[in-house]
Image (cartoon, grey):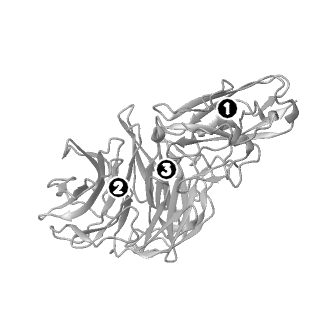
Amino acid sequence: MLRIRSNCIKVLPTFRWILVPALLFLATALTAAQIETIGTQGSYPDIQVDKAGTLHLVYARSGKTYYRMLPAGGKAFTPEESTGVGASRDHQKQPDVAVDAKGGIHVLGNATYNTRSSSGWGSPMSAGVGRDHHMAVTSTGDIWIVYRGSQLSARRKAAGASSFDSPINIFTGGGTDHVYPDICAGTDGTAHVVFRMRYPSNYDCGYLRYDGQKWGSVEWACLNGGPKVEEGPHIALDRNNIPWVAIPEGNLRINHRTGGTWNHTIQTIGSAHTRSEPTIGVDRVGNMFVAVWGGEYHVYRASTKEWTKGKLPSTNTKPLGFVDVVATDEGAFMVYEQGSTVNKSTGAGAVDLVAVKVLPDGSVVPPGTGANKPLESDLSAISARTGGLVVYTMDAGAVNAREGYVLLTSFTGTSPGVQLKGNTLLPLNFDALTWAVFQWLHSPNFDRFTWYLDSAGKGRAVLRVDAGHLINLVGLKFYFAYLTLPEMDFASNAVSLLVEP
């Protein structure tokens, strides 16, 4: 629990029973309900979602990698930022983005690596990797890049290190260097790779697991002697760190690993040919989302055990290209190319990029639709004369389950706010009221202003305003937001309370 000594600040009596909120703060807003482009052009989009629910997007344009983000619960992306790294104009060295547990953003493009922290973009460095690379950051903060080598190579940048380790060959057998690897990281320090290989004479996809200390032996994850695996299998983990693989080989197929072995009763869910890049995501409920080049997508709904097939919408009837998928707590974000020049082999150049959310029932909605607001209140104003109760509802998502929190308040506004770990911003200005409330957290007037979120990452707090206590503050507005403890790596939106007569 966070405690402030009572002699740390002298509190004016007029601030005694102040607190209460209700409207939401979301930095940028898009009011249109229809699907729209994100307002920028590029190709080869790659996305990740951080612990707070913010969507991070990178994409290529004219040989450079650019970055934008969609704040948690928001409806519009922030302005474009140059990352300082390059990007291949074709399929070979497309952009990658990864987010670490502290909110740091890591970007790779054209074998150049850079990071974004609360102070902005750092200095780009050479990652020393070859083509067909993909990147992930483990829960312990290690950066792993896998790429075409001899046959499959990897480089690590250890947590806190200033440079990458020497390259290692993690698979040297097989009969092709067209490996097209994909990598993802678990919540347990592990990393998981899937790649394409002719071994011994049949094209299959291999799987390798890094256990936090070393890379294991190859496992054949896809066809085990069946038809030819085409370029571009992809991998994702479910909430139990079980890997799922999407396989292009004419048919679009999926498989998963349980009990240390692969289930070779492989499901066929659609069609996917060479370079279809069937990206995959699995949400915390067990729903699966797979999409391929051209915009076809498939959703497995865990509650009904049924697949739904659909086509992502074009906003202008132009064809769709590459699609990237990342699962949320429930549902998935998809970002895709849209334009007349989309091309599997040579790249799309500069075309429109579109972001959507796909729900477990297969419906496609704008990316901010259905997003739970991290903080809401049942009132936006309160009478100083009569007082009353204000109820705050918290929803930090299942990734913050059972974490502690503290609900804070301010009377000086939400901007510039307070920068926390990584890129987390608490939208409150600390002032005398903020520190005063620290001292009152255990008063019955501030019920559960500091407590623990439940197993779904949700909570409830109540502000009790006594009659007459705010009579000298009519016309003032107060703001509320919370952060999680002890890491302080998640902050909610702000809600406001107006004091009325």
Looking at the picture, how far across and down is residue 374, in whole percent?
59, 40
SS label for mark 2: strand
Mark positioned earlier in the residue sequence (2 or 3): 2
Q: Which residue is mark 2?
A: 184
Q: Secondary structure at mark 1?
A: helix
- How packed is label 1: few (under 14 Cα within 10 Å), some, or many (20 or more)? some
**Which residue ends up furthest to the left in the rendered image?**
200
Res. 171 in view: yes
Is 263 drawn above or below residue 470 in the view shown?
A: below
Residue occupying image coordinates x 19% and y 45%: 260
Please name whichever residue, 185 or 402, is drawn nearer the observer in this view of the structure: 402
Q: Amino acid at mark 1?
A: Trp
Amino acid type assigned to the residue bearing label 2 in the image? Cys
Residue visible at 85% across and 32% down in the picture: 500
Q: Position of residue 251 (x, y in %)?
A: 28, 53
Point out the residue furthest to the front here: 7
Q: Say which residue label 3 marks.
A: 333
Amino acid type at image mark 3:
Phe
Task: Please indicate whether residue 478 sits to the left or right of residue 418 in the image.
Answer: right
Quick one: label 3 or label 1, which is nearer the N terminus? 3
Which of pointers 1 and 2 indicates the residue nearer the eye?
1
Give me the C-alpha separation between circle 2 and circle 3: 17 Å
Q: Are marks 2 and 3 in contact (CB under 8 Å)?
A: no
Q: Cβ–Cβ below 8 Å for labels 1 and 2? A: no
**Which quadrant of the rendered structure holds the N terminus?**
top right
Residue at the spot of label 1: 440
